Amino acid sequence: MRLLVSPRDIEEARRSLAADIVDVKRPKEGSLGANFPWVIRAIKDLSSKPVSAAIGDFDFKPGGAALAAYGAACAGADYIKVGLMFDGAARAGEFIQGVVRAVKDEFPEKYVVIAAYSDWERLGSISPFAMVPLAAREGADVVMVDTGIKDGRSTLEFMNEDALSEFNQLAHDAGLMTALAGSLKFEDLPLLKRVNPTIIGVRGMVCGGDRESAIREELVHELIAKVR
């Protein structure tokens, strides 16, 4: 299980370098809010750690998402991450296909991360379970579960351990890596280790519980020690 930490700027990224993956996002723009390409590039230059970049929580705008994905890849992101904030299998398949092609045609070594939301029912978006086979069919690399509405409620309030284990197994059976995120807490680690996703993604956990606060380096080190 690898640790992904999501800084919002270069200074926070410096405090996050103990993590396995440094994830660039802009929390004020949403769950998977996109940051600026120059921020991605500057964070990429900090170390040899893989860099992930969120490109947004997208309505059905496959062209816009494909262009954003290509831009994040050009800026240096190793993982390009997008959220599906809409419903419909056919539309989701078309959307994922566009994002994958935008990245893989020029950067086949990079990873495409497709996220659906644990709180999909209140969002009216596609469920993580319906998203997995579409991501596998269209050539994505990682499937992710996160919370779409950042109101302090955890992924674990919407999907219990059995549901997360089912998602994890479904994805692995399809040849995909998995990522779990969404207001996770230190006390959730035993459950997360039992589910054993490829990656866990955090921000609030290493900000002292408030994702709008700054990342604290000592909490990143504490978390990586406990994950190990």
Image (cartoon, rainbow, N blue to C red):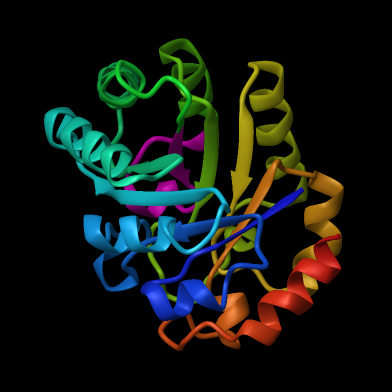
Left or right, 176 with respect to 160, comes to left
Magenta segment range?
112-128
Work out whether 193 lies above or below 140.
Answer: below
- Between 3 and 91, the one nearer to me in the picture: 3
Left or right, 168 with respect to 114, comes to right
Q: How many marks?
A: 0
Residue 39 falls inside the magenta stretch: no
Q: Residue furthest top?
A: 137
**Position of the C terminus by quadrant:** bottom right
- Between 206 and 115, the one nearer to me in the picture: 206
Left or right, 188 with respect to 57, comes to right
Q: Residue at x 46, y 11 (%)?
A: 137
Work out whether 19 lies above or below 128.
Answer: below
Q: Residue at x 43, y 80 (%)?
A: 11
Residue 113 falls inside the magenta stretch: yes
Q: Quadrant of residue 110?
A: top left
Query: Which x, y percent locates residue 160?
Result: 70, 52
Query: Which x, y percent locates residue 134?
Result: 44, 18
Q: Residue at x 71, y 18 (%)?
A: 173
Work out whether 203 lies above or below 192.
Answer: below
Q: Residue at x 34, y 70 (%)?
A: 27
Query: Which x, y percent locates residue 17?
Result: 60, 67
Left or right, 13 with respect to 177, comes to left
Query: Which x, y percent locates residue 206?
Result: 61, 79
- Between 160 and 186, the one nearer to me in the picture: 186
